[in-house]
Image (cartoon, rainbow, N blue to C red):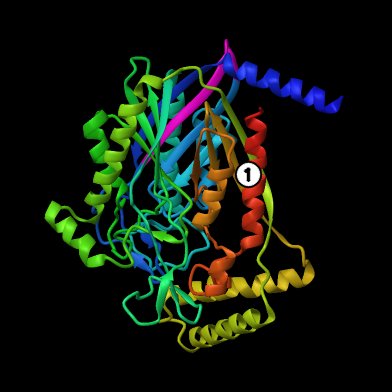
Amino acid sequence: MTRFFFTVLLFFCVSTLDAATLKIGTARNDMTPSKSVPLLGQFNLRLSQGVDTPLRVNVVALESIDGEKQLDAAIFVCADLVMIPDDLVHVVREKVTAKDASIDVNKLIINATHTHTAPTLKLSSPKLPVSDQMMDYPEAIDFTAERIADAVASAWKNRKPGKIAFGLDFGVIGWSRRIVYADGSAQMYGNTNQANFRGIENMEDHDIGSIFFLDENDKVSAVAVNVACPSQVVEGRSTINADYWHPVRETLAKRFGDDLVVLGWCGASGDIAPRPMYRKEAVGRMNSLRKLDEMQEIARKIDRAVADTWEAVQETATDDVPLAHRVETLQLPMRKVTEQEYQAAKAECEKIDAAIKANPNKAPAEVDWMAGGWHGGVVQRYEAQQKDPDIHFPSPIHVVRLGETAILTNQFELFTDYGVQMKARSPAVQTFVIQLVGDGSYLPTERAIRGGSYSAIIQSTPVGPEGGQVLVDETLKTALELFPK
């Protein structure tokens, strides 16, 4: 009897969704800092020395209504940042509410493109040198949050009935970046041109998925592009740069119009980079022959894939689009710190503390971070797990049904295998996985942990493979509820 009631309830909900009207609003804003800022993405402190390209926030607001009644909503926010710290999210929500109290801030889905040349927006970051020409962390957070909130409020205000179309193409944007050697060890960005090289650790995901958002005149007003590759071509620079998403946006705007809003959705790619680990000379030669730099070449590939997809799917554009949005916080089991890992991290903390005490005025800011966050975090986790062996890591997710597509988010630099699992097991016709919807950290596979190295060692990963599988299974469990048979 209970199962019958549940089935009838699901049928009623889906029938209601099918009868709904989809309203779409779009907006974008510039969020390039007006002063120098500390850049996040490297172990050393970098203060920006100029601007190569602007940083953008792009927003698509969706609302499903039945007459005057709202059935559900989802507001996608894509920001040119390394990650989305909680410190930023809290301020964005406050500002959005102040601008328009009708917006449900729990429906905000804020993802980072993972450019490594954007501001640090965490209050717990290392101390900065004092300067009138530089934004400190609170100022940078407030500035960025204001620009994001303005775009969110604008997109919500201008929503009107619209349509969507979606599709899939392929292109090699990212390459696996963990190299395996004869002794079983692995290394991120390891050398492949040596006798003990044995292979690449993980699979690659070459999907380029697109969702096209059409306005009342059937013009493409926005496009979401899902690529399993972070934007870190120019990650080591000391200048502000949106990385490859800047030329992607410029290229797509030439195709669809200058007002185009582009959501750059970074798929599961914690073990992927936008550069080859071998064939480097051949790839470089082809870029030279095309007279393109690395970012322009990526833009060319993405533009081609999106254009080919649009050509195939434009006749399928529809306003009959069920929208359902679930927001949950999963309790993921934390990766256990071993006694050996604890002792090693504790020794490093003691060494760094001694160096700081010996020369407190000249200790670099990154050393302070290494002590407090990198090694210190391991010590804190070990001590916490002694008190509670079953300690868990709260991790928010969003699961969205948009027509026959599923959009699944996580906060991590999620290794590719997990994203492929989600796509393979999803009940949707096409599934989009978005990482870095939150304060990111690596989430590696068992194979990666056996290989070791940065991105798989204990300092890199508060959550391990056990938690990764829980993330996959629980996300798909929610997705299945939104796609009843």
Q: Specify the principal SS of the magenta part.
A: strand
Q: Secondary structure at mark 1?
A: helix
> What residue is rendered at 50% in x and 33% in y?
75
Q: Which residues are magenta?
A: 57-70
Q: Residue furthest top?
A: 67
- Quarter of the image that includes the N terminus: top right
Q: Position of residue 376 (x, y in %)?
A: 59, 74
Q: Please determine whether, in this image, residue 167 is positioned above or below residue 187.
A: above
Judge left or right: residue 357 versus residue 211: right
> What residue is rendered at 39% in x and 56% in y?
119
Q: Is residue 479 visible?
A: yes
Return the residue nearer the eye: 312 or 461.
312
Q: Does the magenta run of residues contain 63?
A: yes
Residue on which disc 1 sits? 475
Return the residue nearer the eye: 235 or 468.
468
Mark 1 surroundings within 10 Å by alpha-carbon count, few (fewer than 14), some (14 through 19), many (20 or more): many
Q: Position of residue 416 (x, y in %)?
A: 49, 55
Q: Does the magenta run of residues contain 385?
A: no
Q: Please determine whether, in this image, residue 463 is positioned above or below residue 301.
A: below
Judge left or right: residue 355 versus residue 336: left
Indicate the amino acid at tag 1.
Thr
The image quarter containing residue 300 is top left
Count of numbered circles on the image:
1
Judge left or right: residue 237 versus residue 166: left
